[in-house]
Amino acid sequence: MVERQSEQADLFATPPTPAPLHDSQALLALLDRWQSNGWLRALDRALVGLLLEQQPEADPRVLLAAALVSHQLGHGHVCLDLTATLSEPDFALSLPPDGETGSDTLLPSQVLGGLSVADWRSALAASALVDSWQPAEGNRPLVLVGERLYLRRYWHYERQVVDSLGRRLGQPLPQTADLPARLQQLFATSQQRPDWQLLACALAARGRFSIITGGPGTGKTTTVVRLLGLLQTPAVAVGQPLRIRLAAPTGKAAARLTESIGQQVGALALDEAVKAAIPTEVSTLHRLLGSLPDSRHFRHHAGNPLALDVLVVDEASMIDLEMMACLLTALPEQARLILLGDKDQLASVEAGAVLGDLCRRADGGWYSAETRAWLEQVSGQSLAEAGLLEGQADTHALEQQTAMLRHSHRFGRDSGIGELARAVNHCDAEQARQLLSRGGFSDIRSRPLKGPGDPAFAALVLGEGGLPGYAGYLEQLRQGRPGAQVGGGDPAWEQWARSVLQAFDRFQLLCAVRKGDWGVEAVNQRVASLLCRRGLLAGEHGWYEGRPVLVTRNDYSLGLMNGDIGIALRIREPALNPAEPEREALRVAFPRNDGSGGIRFVLPSRLPDVESVFAMTVHKSQGSEFAHAALLLPPARNPVLTKELVYTAITRASAQFSLLESREGVFEEAVRTRVRRISGLALEPAGQS
Ligand SMILES: Nc1ncnc2c1ncn2[C@@H]1O[C@H](COP(=O)(O)OP(=O)(O)OP(=O)(O)O)[C@@H](O)[C@H]1O
């Protein structure tokens, strides 16, 4: 009986608080284990070491929070949200990562289980490592704002963005009386009512900052080209053309925009002199700002601002917080900044979801009565039936300069891709499933996969039933190869390489995660083995002809950008001296990405930062488009499986989309989950943000 009582007493006793929250050494041991498991980065662990050196008596709860802020940055979150972390620790921290099932290591939920938000907050506020009061005046490494903990650098970036955009929004530009007439001229053939492209131009013309957001094919490029015509016409007339620059976050996105902007400028109904003053070349943001080797600083900054009057940045959903802060710092106060992008796409891999945060309320419009009246007056169109919500100029300052394009000119109601993208964007999993399973559209389909060896996977990868697959580019590689009589240096080699790269662009497998059976790493290997077994590739390890690779780090000496795709090809090269015969060598062919259509051939040994790209993550695919995109969803629940991820994958497809499901229900779960990027970016009246 006595024994039973003591057993019961034990059952009801408060469990002891896990040691890592009491003892720094125990915490360090735990962090070391997490690091060796691959749960934390060396960087996250090193930060704790540095803080302990600075403050040997530091509270372990503060040190753990610091490691987690750093860990969250690696997952795209600008800060650590204490409440979100404590309410579902393992999920909020994505630990164990990528669907691993755990190990004998303590899980975050076990470590944080007994901690309350109030206690954690108090420990942080009391720490000499944390500024929680007037952080702008302090210099401690961590900053606590409400329940959000930041590394100081990221808190500073966020303030820079909020302050800079706030200043720009506070300086509307005077408008000329002929604006309505000039808008009418540019949109003479307009059919839509209201025409959001026209309204977007009007809003952007009146401010130093504006956002034009819209889904695929809603006419963002078309709109911005007309806007540039609108701005440049009076400037050219007085002999002072505006200095306009166009940029995009990646080389691939820049190349796509260079191509489409070139076509659209030619079609503008404006004077040749105005058209000639609209640039068509798009550079990457890194190039625009002037990257410095081995540094996160740029040549252009507040002390050496960019020499321009108008800057347009496309694919703005891919801009991370640090880049946005650097861009705004380098932008002259008088210059106009126009961001273009699809707010519903995934954010950049780096920390911050700037466009998504800035467009949080774009669907509702939220124009003030003055903005609305002004828009109706300059456009001659009524907004009464547009279903907009009414905002206030001061509480919705950003919304007064934001336009959302609402009509897709590429994907109409008869397009399965368009309908599926819309359903997914609305988190409507049932509708999305119906669209996929009803078979009413020939451009979308889903395939259940029983396991890694499922023949349905192999069939899709090769290219079943007339759908583009990887067999296509390999066939082009074999059949288009210049004959034995074609000498090294002959343009035929470049033409062939271009055609192989174009054929490769017709299909892409997209993965949600990197690890596991359905992650990028395993799928890349599986596809290489499959193509090798079928005799389509001569190898599957190391360098072999036909290997497609993705550049994973900018290399300025080679002119290659993170995200560029090349293919290893055996080409004939001119002999180094005339006495020697020409030789064949394996080179990696990359498009020049400057609109010229040129190819550069690079020695494989000069490419340390590349990986095979039979599969790529959805994140990496942003800014690219493929005739056929296939999304592979892994079975395990994972915070990266969100509707934004699925939407981004679907909208990479220009003609065909396939969904590959490794578990029933995983698609629905993803579509019902919204991305959570933790940040404090909000342009609210002073004092609220
Ligand atoms: N007002 C319009 N009327 C008719 N066609 C249009 C209109 N606006 C755009 N288009 C056409 O729709 C297509 C997509 O336009 P555009 O490339 O400008 O869209 P986008 O939003 O930039 O697309 P992306 O998804 O590639 O970013 C183009 O073929 C373009 O010519």
Image: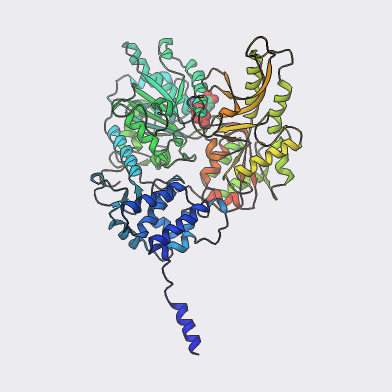
The residue lying toward the viewer, choosing from 447 and 459, is 459
- Seen in the picture, residue 659 relative to 402 is either above or below; the reply is below
Residue farthest front in this picture: 579
Q: Residue at x 44, y 49 (%)?
A: 71
Is 616 in front, or is 385? Answer: 616
Query: Where does residue 212 sit, x and y in percent of width and height?
Result: 42, 32
The picture places residue 351, in percent across and down from the top left corner, at 42, 42
How many numbered callouts? 0
The part of the image, by quadrant, that contains residue 521 is top right
Q: Is residue 211 something that shows in the picture?
A: yes
Please name the colour scheme applied to the rendered image. Answer: rainbow
Q: Nearer the viewer, residue 379 or 123?
A: 123
Question: Where is residue 469, by image quadrant?
Answer: top right
Name the image quarter holding residue 298.
top left
Left or right of 613 in this view: 462: right
x then y, percent, for residue 62: 35, 56
Residue 482: image x %, image y %? 71, 17
For the residue pair 162 and 144, the one nearer the viewer reads as 144
Residue in the image at 54% along x and 62% along y = 104
Q: Image check: 366 left or right of 640?
A: left
As drawn, the residue found furthest toward the bottom would be 1
Up/down of 426 relative to 308, above or below: below
- Residue 80 in sight from this viewpoint: no
Whether 514 is drawn above or below 559: the answer is below
* Residue 471 drawn above or below residue 638: above
